[in-house]
């Protein structure tokens, strides 16, 4: 039997560059975390290293939350535990990483040591707090990808023979791509959209990346362009993601319809916006209240537009029909002159 994941043997501690921040400002904090994975028979060293790293990152994020919670209290920002974890994952940056294999008895153990920075001075926490819904949406995607890796790892540990080899190939790819996607999403959360665009462009230019991962890379890059208000570039990437053969099993590529719908709404293309947002809602888990409200608003505006066009009064998007108003004024003046 394969020796299971022995858990995160974690040595996590804060090395404070300075004392905890007061209300005057924040200082960078250094967090060091270790994750450990013990290999079983026929386990892949790369998978062992990646699994240990994911555990170390999880631990570092938890500890970063302690600092973020303390700091936000000094800034009179009220965040829930989930929001604290979300912000912690956004402001955490890996500075150094070291993987060490070690033979313990008759089993190999991989340890990954991370040195991370939490620097709230580089991130506008007030802006993060005011944009909770958007950041939470990205965080949900990041968490889902990590959970999928955990699920794949559990299957990998139970499998044997050719099944284990096949799952191993899938897991290695998932870890590699997941790391790029996670870092790009964090950049978008931090407002570093151009860095995210650069990282994702490298992935898109790699001919080995195909199918759903390629579609998701297009979608994420489109998200970055969307945040930069580069609507044409965002729409181009969303269309590329839509055209790339994919499924939504591993990556929430369906979200492209939500953001395409938002852009269409701002362009007053209400029918198109409603159609896109409906596709997004139907593909979702029906828990996104903001998506539902955006859909209802787009459908209402599209319905208003159709009624206005049927009445010939210019349409909702044009507001007052000045041609009709001026015509009525002239007609009234002529009638008044005839009466005199």
Image (cartoon, grey):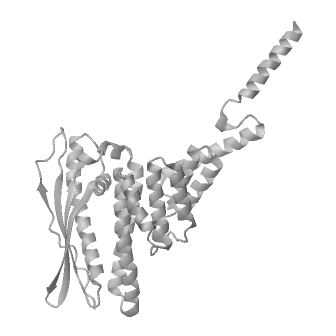
* In-image side of 78 versus 212 (left or right): left
- Asked whether 215 or 297 is in front, the reply is 215
Q: Farthest residue toward the right?
A: 338
Q: Farthest residue toward the top?
A: 340
Whether residue 91 is situated above or below residue 100 in the rendered picture: above
Name the residue: 39% across, 82% down: 169
Rendering quarter of residue 115? bottom left
Indicate the position of residue 330 as horizontal and vertical percent values.
80, 18
Indicate the position of residue 269 as horizontal and vertical percent values.
63, 46
Whether residue 12 is situated above or below residue 168 in the rendered picture: above
Indicate the position of residue 42 as horizontal and vertical percent values.
29, 90
- Asked whether 98 or 167 is in front, the reply is 98
Name the residue: 37% across, 60% down: 184
Residue 259 can be seen in this image: no
Which image quarter is the N terminus in?
bottom left
Which image quarter is the C terminus in?
top right
- Asked whether 218 or 201 is in front, the reply is 201
Residue 317 can be seen in this image: yes
Name the residue: 39% across, 59% down: 198
Indicate the position of residue 5 as horizontal and vertical percent values.
25, 80
* In-image side of 224 versus 301 (left or right): left
């Amino acid at each position: 039997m394969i020796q299971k994941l022995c858990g995160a043997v974690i040595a996590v501690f804060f090395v404070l560059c300075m004392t905890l921040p007061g209300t005057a400002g924040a200082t960078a904090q250094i967090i060091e975390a270790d994750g450990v994975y013990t290999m079983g028979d026929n386990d892949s060293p790369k998978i062992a290293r990646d699994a240990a790293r994911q555990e170390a990152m999880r631990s570092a994020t938890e500890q970063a939350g302690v600092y973020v919670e303390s700091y936000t209290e000094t800034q009179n920002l009220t965040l829930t535990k989930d929001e604290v974890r979300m912000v912690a994952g956004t402001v955490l940056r890996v500075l150094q990483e070291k993987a060490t294999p070690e033979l313990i008895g008759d089993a190999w153990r991989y340890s990954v040591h991370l040195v991370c920075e939490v620097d709230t001075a580089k991130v506008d926490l007030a802006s993060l707090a005011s944009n909770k819904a958007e950041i939470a949406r990205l965080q949900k995607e990041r968490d889902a990808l990590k959970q999928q890796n955990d699920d794949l790892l559990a299957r990998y540990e139970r499998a044997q023979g050719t099944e284990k080899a096949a799952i191993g190939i899938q897991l290695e790819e998932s870890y590699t791509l997941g790391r790029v996607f996670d870092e790009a999403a964090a950049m978008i959360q931090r407002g570093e959209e151009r860095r995210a665009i650069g990282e994702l462009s490298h992935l898109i230019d790699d001919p080995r990346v195909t199918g759903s991962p390629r579609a998701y890379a297009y979608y994420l890059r489109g998200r970055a362009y969307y945040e930069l208000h580069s609507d044409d570039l965002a729409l181009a990437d969303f269309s590329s993601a839509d055209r790339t053969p994919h499924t939504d099993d591993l990556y929430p590529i369906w979200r492209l319809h939500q953001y395409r719908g938002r852009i269409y709404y701002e362009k007053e293309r209400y029918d198109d916006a409603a159609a896109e947002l409906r596709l997004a809602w139907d593909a979702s888990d029906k828990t996104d209240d903001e998506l539902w409200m955006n859909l209802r608003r787009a459908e209402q505006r599209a319905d208003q537009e159709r009624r206005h066009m049927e009445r010939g009064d210019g349409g909702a998007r044009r507001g007052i029909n000045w041609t009709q108003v001026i015509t009525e004024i002239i007609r009234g003046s002529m009638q008044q002159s005839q009466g005199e």
